[in-house]
Amino acid sequence: MKRSELHQHNARQYINGRWETGATTGVRRNPSDTTEVVSEYARADRRQAERAVRAAADAFPAWSHSTAQRRADALDAIGSEILARQDELGLLVAREQGRPLPDAVAEAQRAGQLFKYFAGEALRAHGETLASARPGVQVDVTREAVGVVALVTPWSSPLAVPARKIAAALAFGNSVVFKPSERVPACGWMLAEIVSRAALPAGAFNLLMGSGRELGAALVEGSAVDAISFTGSGAVGARVTQAAAKRRARVQLETGGQNALVVMADAELERAVECAVQGAYACSGQRCTASSRLIVEAPIYDAFVARLRQRMAALRVGHALEKGVAVGPVIDDAQLARNLEWVRAAREEGAELVHGGEALERPSPGYYMSPALLLALPGHKAARAEVFGPVACVLQAQDYGHALALANDSTNGLCAGICTRSLAHATHFRRHARVGTTLVNLPTSAEDYHVPSGGRRAGGDGARAQGRQAAEFFTLLKTNYVQA
Ligand code: NAD
């Protein structure tokens, strides 16, 4: 990568169709090389938040009644531009978030596909006509935009999660106030920059950057938004729900995972190991769908652990832009310290560390650690929490029933996978895993952009992002009677 391609971005707010500086600025550095500043970004204050919400409310009547064709064209243009610039966007994701470049480009591509998908959704009829119970009466059920929607997003999916929310909200005629995570402001800004050129009316889309504690809370608690779509940690999600309930604002929660991958004795060993490697350590384990619990049936346990350790030893940890790197840095120093603390505490509880779990030095200063594998017991804290780093626990199961019980022994219900050649076990698992997404012989990851995504219990409130089910959150139902 040529040094000249590594711009420092100057990321500003976008309010009522204009770019603005903030009350203060923040600086975001590259986690692969902390000497490199990726962006200097504007931080909005409460007053800017209020103005953005007001602008969105003013834009709402016209935007929500704009033609479906207009909304579809705007989203299609945004999707096309993202896809055309996916390498540039991917480079930014790799620099700002630390995800290895090929994965980062895939993240950008997914964001483009999401806009294209929702361009189509804007045009599809979302309503139904029913026969009335009474003679001469017609009844139909239509969907309408909700109003001003605040979109609060995490750093772990810096383009695709914002894209699915922005695209769905705009497709159905909502106006948007988007607050990306303060750890990936430049990704949020670049996405907003593309959206800003799609001929939307001023105020229909606004970008605010800043901390969650101040700006996020101001948006959720104090402002007049009609709905909040939140993706992030369970703890913050709980706070958002409480604040929204007070104002009777609608909430969509997509929160953490603590996902299980079950490996049955009849699984194809190489495939199961690959599922575990991808599921647990891709994106340094910083994915809501990461397999943090590998539940392995006793007869294959030793062979699986031995093969997984071999495979992990071959994983290259390094700078996100370096060719062949499988595991990039973690997001920041606080996350690195937390991950190492989880490993230390797990060992103190009696878990056996059989690979990694150490901070690493690389030619550039960054937040590197070797992926950790712990042989643990179901009660160990590291096997019950969302670590959100390259740390996985292996748990032994006596048989299929035990493995399923362990997989379901979690308050989070985002996703769960099974590796098996048994149709009976795969089918039973799909029906009985208490999660929002199941995977058979695949890594735990929700790749497809046109199907619903979401969790249950502490993994989310059940409202789905993506797919046609996104309409359920981003629209309100209206029942209309007419006497013919
Ligand atoms: P986080 O909860 O710390 O922050 C998420 C967003 O909320 C950020 O924009 C942050 O600024 C904002 N925020 C923080 N405090 C706030 C407050 N008091 N009021 C309003 N907003 C506030 O989460 P994170 O560390 O950015 O992301 C990681 C988490 O996200 C993990 O738990 C992961 O599982 C989850 N996640 C879930 C999904 C999913 O689809 N279920 C997808 C990606 C990430």
Image: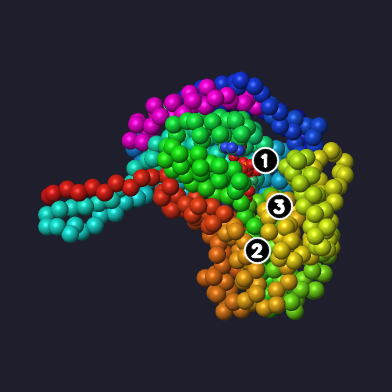
**Looking at the image, is mark 3 or mark 1 nearer the viewer?**
3
User: Is residue 428 positioned above or below 150 on the image?
Assistant: below
Decide if residue 4 is on the left or right side of residue 449.
right
Q: Position of 192 compared to 140: left or right?
A: right
Q: Which mark is residue 387?
A: 3
Which is nearer the N-term, disc 2 or disc 3? 2
Query: Residue 232: x percent and y percent?
Result: 60, 45
Give, as a three-letter code, the residue at label 1. Answer: Val
* Residue hosting label 2: 260
| Residue that numbered label 1 is attached to | 93
The secondary structure making up most of the magenta span is: helix
Crowd class of label 2 (few under 14; some 14 to 19; many from 20; radius 10 Å): many
Q: CA distance from mark 2 to mark 3?
A: 13 Å
Where's the N terminus, which quadrant? top right
Instruction: Tell me: is circle 1 under 8 Å from ligand 1.
Output: no
Q: Residue at x 82, y 63 (%)?
A: 350
* Magenta run includes residue 54: yes
Mark 1 falls on what kind of element?
A: helix
Q: Earlier in the sequence, mark 1 or mark 2?
A: 1
